Amino acid sequence: MAKELDTFPERPGGRRIAGESFYNRFLDGKIWKLKRGEDFHCTTESARASAWKAAKVMGVSVQTAIQGDFLVIQAVSETGDSR
């Protein structure tokens, strides 16, 4: 019989990058350098795309830079100031 759950279970290998609390933490206007394999578990390009999508949902813009296995992100206002 089907059972309703309150939360989605964690996936093996770590947290999901698309989680709302993940982006609430990192799209706060500060500059963050995230490391693949520690802070997210997908390709750096996928993490960047997820950050853009989450920023749109949150009503902010985001600037990003890929540096090897690192993703640098910062939420910014429409005028270019940090959130």
Image: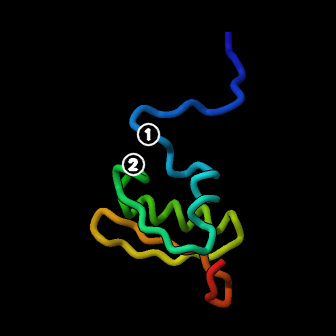
Q: Give the residue drawn at x 57%, y 30%.
A: 9
Question: Cα distance, mark 2 to mark 1?
Answer: 7 Å
**Horizontal and vertical percent for residue 66?**
36, 72
Amino acid type at image mark 2: His
Tag of residue 14:
1
> Would you place residue 5 above or below residue 42 in this image?
above
Q: Give the residue drawn at x 71%, y 70%.
A: 59
> Badge 2 is on which residue?
41
Mark 1 crowd level (few <14, some 14–19, many ≥20, 10 Å Cα): few
Tag of residue 76:
none
Say how the picture is coloured.
rainbow
Check if mark 2's residue and mark 1's residue have beta carbons within 8 Å.
yes
Q: Give the residue drawn at x 38%, y 64%.
A: 45
N-terminal of the two: label 2 or label 1? 1
* Nearer the observer, 38 or 60: 38
Mark 2 crowd level (few <14, some 14–19, many ≥20, 10 Å Cα): some
Look at the numbered disc 2 and give the secondary structure of its residue.
loop
